[in-house]
Image (cartoon, coloured by chain):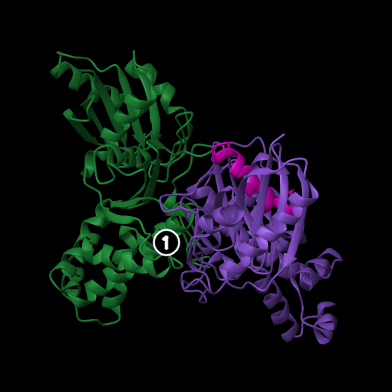
Chain colours: A purple, B green
Amino acid sequence: MELLLGVDIGGTNVKAGLVSGDGTVVASSMRGWSGGEPDEAVSLAARLAGELTGAHPEAAPTRCGTGCAGLVDGHRGTVLRSPNLPTWHDVELKAMLSAALGLRTLVDNDANAAAYAEYVLGAARGARSAVVITLGTGVGGGIVIDGRVYRGAHGFAGEIGHAVIDIDGAACACGGSGCLEGLVNARSLVARANEAIEEGARTSLADVARERTLTAKDVGDAAGRGDAVAGKVVAETGRVLGAGLANLIQVLDPDVIVVGGGVAAVGEPLLAPAREEMAARACGRGPNLPRVTFAELGELAGMVGAALLARDELDAA
Amino acid sequence: MELLLGVDIGGTNVKAGLVSGDGTVVASSMRGWSGGEPDEAVSLAARLAGELTGAHPEAAPTRCGTGCAGLVDGHRGTVLRSPNLPTWHDVELKAMLSAALGLRTLVDNDANAAAYAEYVLGAARGARSAVVITLGTGVGGGIVIDGRVYRGAHGFAGEIGHAVIDIDGAACACGGSGCLEGLVNARSLVARANEAIEEGARTSLADVARERTLTAKDVGDAAGRGDAVAGKVVAETGRVLGAGLANLIQVLDPDVIVVGGGVAAVGEPLLAPAREEMAARACGRGPNLPRVTFAELGELAGMVGAALLARDELDAA
């Protein structure tokens, strides 16, 4: 069976994997890095690919799919900018990787790649249209309609994290303000918890915060243990997320919305109020709402999805 | 050449027209009505159709396309609810019209129909993907991608007026709050002007307001004559519209955004600040932005677009 090379370039690590034609990960490898220059990422990806193929001489990959964090033109395979890769501007990543790897290569936004994996193999399989939202440090999104990633006219569709839901809200790293990202990302969850602690709320998180910096996982775990303050913080974040989901149903009306990423690990205490808020803002659609569910594929979704995009969008060798 | 029957059912009038296969209006007719029961609208449409075909015996229409105001399931041709047709709930409009007219009939949201007309014949012709926004009493929207109206999983996509852009904003007639509609519709433009007058701003609109109720056209006309207060009101409305347009580029990244409806008649003083705000919230897309332009087809766009949808989506006789 044909092997594909999947690559995922983020702000803190680079992943590569050999992926079979049915999406199975044959082998994968990850290196931490500090988001340096594009050349460095490309060398790192090529080194990982070389190690993987050296260890699996029985078959060589013929095509490469790469997901990259940032504003990626998925048609041309260029990275315009990337908040977590601050030196990257108008990087011709597809051409660079293709030359370094000696493989035909596709480059897309990492969230688009992850969305495609969930659509083909994960929580959105069987759906006709799906939106996949990744809640982490940033908030990414990908849209798949009728089996294809929907990229829009300039290749930048699906940037759900930067839809405005609070027009007079706080400035966002993107240059806009009041974006969904700043209100539902990991930092905002922690900020809400810290605010409650400062206001003197009785919560187990106050003890943690005296020892070290709170994380989104701390807040989620405390909510899971029944800490009422943490629960309220998670519910408020879910409510804001639900308003963002409502915008998706107003504009796109998808079959299914999949929520993934680190913040999603908080689980139902986040998603239940999100569904409720979404339904309250659904303008009389009644039961005609998308299923809202958790991502299934975990941390390798971007790498696997990128490989599947190469399988389905690049001509075979 | 085949004739099509186009029908447009709104809250204040019903339009019908004979439309040729190339979108030319051969004849059309309109009756005011007060948004009564579905039966009444269907009878009215059938009566108008009978009059039109009676006056044009040379050819009979073979298919009917109908646009209707409200939350319309464009797949099934049913109207779930309609703020301007308050007694309508789960109306099987397609079946009713089809029986009354004796024609195969398609029913869709009026804004979807208008969007399709602009895509085929108007301001969005030649585009691959387009969003058409209609700013009036309500704010409607339609999305056309690769030549097809995009309706989504349940038939309700494109409800751009009810995307949330002010999460803690005022209640909307739809049941949600902070929807784009309430911040850019005709009423909001007039409300901003009245607020300025109450605050004692020096504006020609104050004289008008002493005589009668201000309209959106008054505000737009005053802005066009150089009234600074009216200009500021229009620019503020444009700025909010621009945030709504920014959401469309983040999610859909279309080739072109077309703005129509009564409020759009205000012209460039509205659209220039809208474009500026959209660009400011575009997260580093640089020049990779959609063209934002005015609708070209006027008041018959919904009727014509509905006929064109019948041409392109219903099997020929």
**Residue appearing at x 37%, y 66% in the figure:** B279
Image check: B18 left or right of A283?
A: left
Give amino acid for label 1. Ala
Q: Quadrant of the C terminus of chain A?
A: top right
Q: Which residues are magenta?
A: A295-317
Q: Nearer the viewer, residue A127 or B112?
A: A127
Image check: B4 left or right of A228?
A: left
Q: Secondary structure at mark 1?
A: helix
Q: Which residue is mark 1?
A: B246
x and y percent of residue B243 in the render?
A: 41, 64
**Magenta span has A312?**
yes
Q: Is residue B301 visible?
A: yes
x and y percent of residue B121 in the render?
A: 24, 38
**Magenta span has B159?**
no
Image check: A231 left or right of B215?
A: right
x and y percent of residue B36 in the render?
A: 36, 36
Image check: B133 left or right of A168?
A: left
Q: Quadrant of the N terminus of chain A?
A: top right
